Image (cartoon, rainbow, N blue to C red):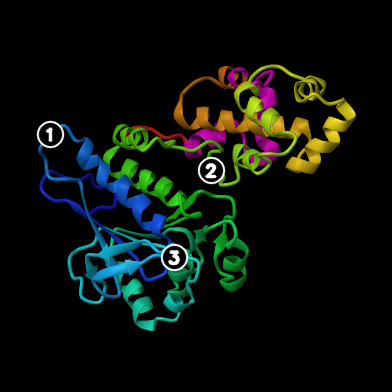
Amino acid sequence: MKRNEKTTKHQARTIALLGFDGVAALDITGPYEVFSLPTFLAQDKTVPPYRIVLLADQPGPVRSASGLSLIADASWHTFHDKIDTLLICGGPEMKPQQSNRQLLAWLRTMARRTRRIGSICTGAFLLAEAGLLKSRRATTHWREVTRLAQEYRSITVEPDAIYVKDGHVYTSAGITAGMDLALALVEEDLGRDVALAVARMLVLFLKRPGGQSQFSTQLQAQAVEGKRLANLLSWLADHHHKSMTVDEMAAQAGMSPRTFARVFVTETGDTPALYLEKLRLEHAVRLLETTGTSLDMTAQACGFTGHEQLRRAFQRHKGITPQEYRQRFQRTGC
């Protein structure tokens, strides 16, 4: 089967999720919901695009790290059906899985037999231990990226990526990023319209704010909730496209410019001007990924003075031009 081949009406693709006692429940249930919804949303009676199975050491109950029990459909030891996509889920403690030599050998075999293999969150450590990330780009939960890079030196770890595709191997960031990865796989298989319908049903972004980064400015803003700038940062999320000065932001926060500048850096780690530029850049990223609007229109819609200011911001933060970013990441129907 070609890797870019569309799902036919005659055969459902098997998506296998690998779990274990101590797994993060959402690593399983999040992608499971994403892959199950195309069938629910279908308007005809064709064969479902996906068949989803949960594999574990043994069939039956799998107790997650949170205490929620899930039911494994089969054991990976004895599951011989053809798997299209295998995703290894993560959990807070991966050492028992990393030391399971039989499981590692099975993963190496499955990497040759499946169209796609990937990980969610700390599942990347299992792929790494099996040697499947050697000389590849990868990511994992933000709290574990340093450890992944230190323990597996041949991996090029991308610490702020939501998910990374390197050949037929995929890795995602922490927990809910597994749903972002699953949406991307649905889009690869079934097209943008289906993936967008799934995202809408789940009340998710098809491409979350912040584009490629798991450290978006709006997530950063949540970290100061309850502090002095919480209301201002919420207001900026809705008004960053408007022309404004630091003094105007200070007035909105009810502080003197000097006090405002000091408090802002203390609570966010950025100057007000830099934070505002990041918000605008993230808006531009979403437009470049999802629309064909001109650079001038994109710049104006985000609060930049023009495409030259937009270009300079891209060069500072991403090291490429807006045109290069669009060519690399724009999502088109397939």
Residue visible at 46% across and 25% down in the picture:
291
Callout 2 secondary element: loop
Frontmost of labels 1 and 3 is 3
Frontmost of labels 2 and 3 is 3
**In this picture, is 52 found above or below 146?**
above
Residue identifier under label 2: 212
Q: Amino acid at mark 1?
A: Asp
Query: Could you tell me which quadrant the N terminus lies in?
Result: bottom left
Q: Amino acid at mark 3?
A: Ala
Q: Between marks 2 and 1, how big is the CA–CA gap?
A: 34 Å
Q: What segment carries the magenta color?
A: 300-329
Instruction: Kindly identify which numbered label has been placed on residue 65.
Output: 3
Residue visible at 35% across and 53% down in the picture:
29
Residue visible at 83% across and 26% down in the picture:
255
User: Can residue 168 be seen by looking at this rendering?
Assistant: no
Q: Amino acid at mark 2?
A: Gln
Q: Position of residue 141 (x, y in %)?
A: 54, 57
Q: Quadrant of residue 107?
A: bottom left
Q: In the shown orientation, is residue 156 left or right of residue 94?
A: right
Q: Position of residue 219 (x, y in %)?
A: 60, 41
Query: Could you tell me which quadrant the C terminus lies in?
Result: top left
Instruction: Name the N-terminal-most of marks 2 and 1.
Output: 1
Residue identifier under label 1: 44
Callout 1 secondary element: loop
- Badge 1 crowding class, 10 Å Cα cut-off, few under 14, some 14 to 19, many 20 or more, is few
